[in-house]
Image (tube, grey):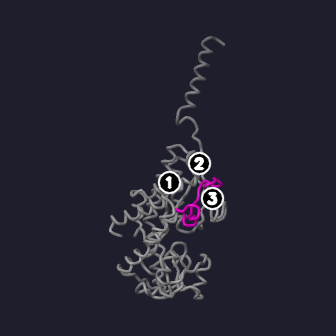
Amino acid sequence: MTRWGKVICLLAVAMAFIVAATPGFAEAKKYTLRIQCIYPETSYVPQMIKQFVAKAEEYTKGQVEIKLFWPGQLVSAKKGFDSVSKGTVEGLVSALIYYGGTLKEGKVEWLPFTWRDPKEAYDLYVNGGFLDLMRKATQKQNVQYLFPVMAGTMGCMTNFPVNNLDDFKGKKMRAPGLDGPIVKLLGASPVSLSAKEIYMSLQRGTVDGVVYPYYTLSTYKLYEVIKYAILPGFHTPAMTGLYLNLDFWKSLTPELQVALNKAGIETFYASSLKSPEWDQSALKAAEGKGVKVMELSQADVAKVRKMCMPLWDKVGGATPLSKELVDLMKSYLQKKGAL
């Protein structure tokens, strides 16, 4: 090989190294994000998660491939949080109230009579610092709280009229989690039932009412076994979310983290618009089937919220972060004139 030939070869090799090291020329690393969703594919929360997937794949330019799995396909709902913490799966769509024994701060999201509407909830999480604190809590369990998803209002649906709070006395109400103590304070007896048992229990009169999402009047056909829907709800709206394994999150480039966060917050906002639509659609359809919608007076609502304060303080006393979250909630609602 001639002298000039050797020079040209060396230049070609050097150019190859430069091109390979230049962003845009090297093939970008691909990531696979498997998300276990505990809710059936046809329900409302998965509809929002599918929107997130489309946005995320667009914003990451396909670098993050997202695969959705439905109830039980990878792990059970019961093992969901532990599985995402350990990295058995990279992502989980669920509600933190199910894992209150592991993540005590998750109970704060499910305190009754907190934010009064989706707009207030979105503002508290995104602009009020609530999501930042929730992320601090989940990160201690090796989980990144990517974004919340609003899941419609959870309120009382009964087979007895509720003109005032005294009408709850002596009744039996299916009331899960933190709703049980409030139902008890109202003079009713909280009953534990699985979702599958609700319809038959109402039909047989085993319970007189339930605290459950209003949209189940349509999706579970509860309008067939319910006579009254009582406003406002206990959770307006209820909150679910997408949680990622923290090691997976840290393995992403800063640019990909920004892209996923952007897709997540946009989806959270979209759920704030959809949540009241789900409520209104279900309540309107139920009224057409003979269900009567009743509304508590503002005085009664204020009374119930005051009754909730000892429960808020009890949940807030579980951990220092729980207290921060409850204090932040109180401060925010006081500024809004709700407390």
User: Mark 3–mark 1 contact, CB under 8 Å?
Assistant: no
Residue 313 at least partly seen: yes
- Residue 308 in percent (x, y) is at 44, 73
SS category of the residue bearing label 2: helix
According to the picture, the residue beneath numbered tag 3 turns out to be 82
**In the displayed structure, would residue 251 be above or below residue 24?**
below
- The residue type indicated by label 1 comes to Lys
Q: Which residue is painted at 57% across and 40% down in the image?
A: 28
Residue span colored magenta: 85-104
Marks 1, 2: nearer the viewer? 1
Looking at the rendered structure, the number of numbered marks drawn on it comes to 3
Quadrant in which the C terminus is drawn: bottom left
Decide which of tag 1 and tag 2 comes sooner along the chain.
1
- The residue type indicated by label 2 comes to Asp
Give the distance between the C-alpha atoms of the residues marked 1 and 2, in whole angstroms.
Answer: 15 Å
Decide which of tag 3 and tag 1 comes sooner along the chain.
3
- Residue 314 in percent (x, y) is at 48, 68
Q: Residues within 10 Å of mark 1 (few under 14, many from 20)?
A: some
**In the displayed structure, would residue 177 be above or below residue 129?**
below
According to the picture, the residue beneath numbered tag 2 turns out to be 247
